[in-house]
Amino acid sequence: MRLNAQTLPTVAATVQRPAYDRSALEPGIVHLGIGAFHRAHQAVYTEDALNRAFGPWGIVGVSLRSPDTRDALAPQDGLYTVAVRDAAGESLRVVGSILECLVAPEDPAAVLERMTRPSVRIVTVTVTEKGYCHDPATGALNESHPDIVHDLAEPERPRTAVGFLAEALARRHALGLAPFTVLSCDNLPSNGDTVAGILRRFATLRSPEFGAWVTEAVACPNSMVDRIVPATTEADRAHVAAALGAEDSWPVMTERFTQWVVEDRFPAGRPAWELEGVEMVADVHPYETMKLRLLNGSHSTLAYLGYLAGYETVSDAISDPGMARLIRGLMDEESGPTLHLPPGADLERYKDALIERFRNPALRHRTWQIAMDGTQKLPQRLLGTARERLAAGASIDRLALGVAAWMRYAAGVDEQGKPIDVRDPLAARLAEIAADAKGDPDRLAGWLFGLTAVFGSDLPADPRFTGPVSAALRRLYAEGARAVLAAA
Ligand code: CS2
């Protein structure tokens, strides 16, 4: 039996399900990038808001690349399971806020049609860092990105998130419809301002008048999103099917913790998210910096070192006492002191909670998954922190070790001589550099520092940065990650 609208009433009685009348739900949000994270985070908050204060806020999910999510959810009438797991056990719920899924490359016109409906008032976005087609060191649109070049040449058949946003906004403008609000939910610094800048530049390249209108009329609030959502495995599918009493092709696995902090700028309206724990604030910046630097900065450091040390998951890696010391030290001594805390924040509790979340034994979050797309992640996770520390004349030893571990990982061969599957938009360039460096840490570091899209031009010119990173990389090559952790 497959989970769908008809079988929903027969799933296990302990499973929470939509409390509203789904047949009355109309689309109010289009979501670009419907992966596991969206389904475990924003779609759940919207589901809770619908349960509490029903309104026209159904979600149309869009995949910009593969048909997998649509293929899984279409036979299920958009229904799917969220499994919340930790050491204490598991709870399941079926979420109904996603009305339909579209696959952009198959039918871009259908996506634009949904985005141009008068009822659609928000477009949310989770396309990961690389989906913004920008220069991660500066946040500016990468105008020579092949997909951007394509979307400027063929605006009616876009490939990128910014291409869809711009074309849909242009059509709404021509039709006299109010623009939708664009809400980025990716782990980028000032994600709303970043998407606004990219959209403004893209629109200006289409025409200066359109660029001016976008700048004036389209709201792009900043938001901080937080929930750990590892990729679903076959074992997870089998387990959920047994517990549910129905097959779900793509359940999502997550932790109990969840947080969403959003700037309250929604001129066209929004769901009653605040009733369900979303913090609607005037300034997201302090929340976002705290999360990117403490959670994500630690995550990436742990992922590269953990992978090199032979740990498959985050919980395995943090159970190494050296890793636990390193990550706590990184937060206590280096990233934590750079923060301007949000009102009421308790930094010590936040750090304790992070370590507990990393220890969650029920999640099996792979270090390899977090290691992906390092060139897109390092700037906001580690490098901004390093810049501020250097400006204050402070040490960056642990940050440098994180960066060096990325370099060692990006070289593409592990400590046993086995190839690493390095996933990164710059993977081809990384492989060339690694081949030229031939295992020499100084040459490897030197060439990687030359990636200005990652390091900018300031850090490679500062020996207080390059020195500690190169030294850490030499140690990783000479001693191996386990020994470096043992001495941490
Ligand atoms: C992780 C994040 O994959 C990664 O890079 O650091 O996805 C992390 O799990 C989330 O940001 C948690 O909110």
Image: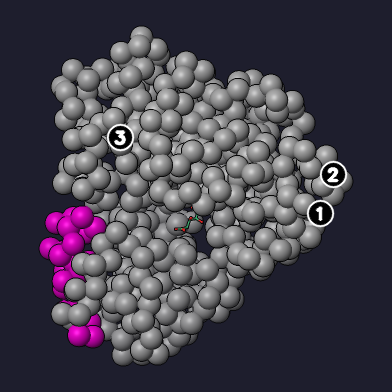
Residue nearest the observer in this picture, 363 or 21:
21
Left or right of 60 on screen, residue 373: left
| Amino acid of disc 1 | Gly
How far apart are the two marked residues, 2 and 1, measured between alpha carbons? 8 Å
Q: Position of residue 200 (x, y in %)?
A: 25, 29
Label 1 secondary element = loop
Q: Position of residue 342 (x, y in %)?
A: 49, 40
Left or right of 313 on screen, residue 215: left
Left or right of 152 on screen, residue 359: right
In the image, is residue 240 above or below residue 417? above
Q: Nearer the viewer, mark 1 or mark 3?
A: 3
Label 2 secondary element = helix
Which residue corresponds to the image point at 15% horizontal and 22% vertical from the top-left?
Answer: 208
How far apart are the two marked residues, 1 and 3, measured between alpha carbons? 42 Å
Indicate yes or no whether the magenta region holds residue 325: no
Disc on the earlier residue, 2 or 1: 2
In this rendering, the count of numbered labels is 3
Circle 2 Cα neighbour tier, 10 Å, few/some/many (<14 / 14–19 / ≥20): few
Give the residue pinned by disc 1.
245
Which residue corresponds to the image point at 84% horizontal and 44% vertical from the top-left?
Answer: 10
Disc on the earlier residue, 3 or 2: 2
Give the residue pinned by disc 3.
157
Stretch in magenta: 438-465
| Amino acid of disc 2 | Thr
Q: Which mark is residue 10?
A: 2
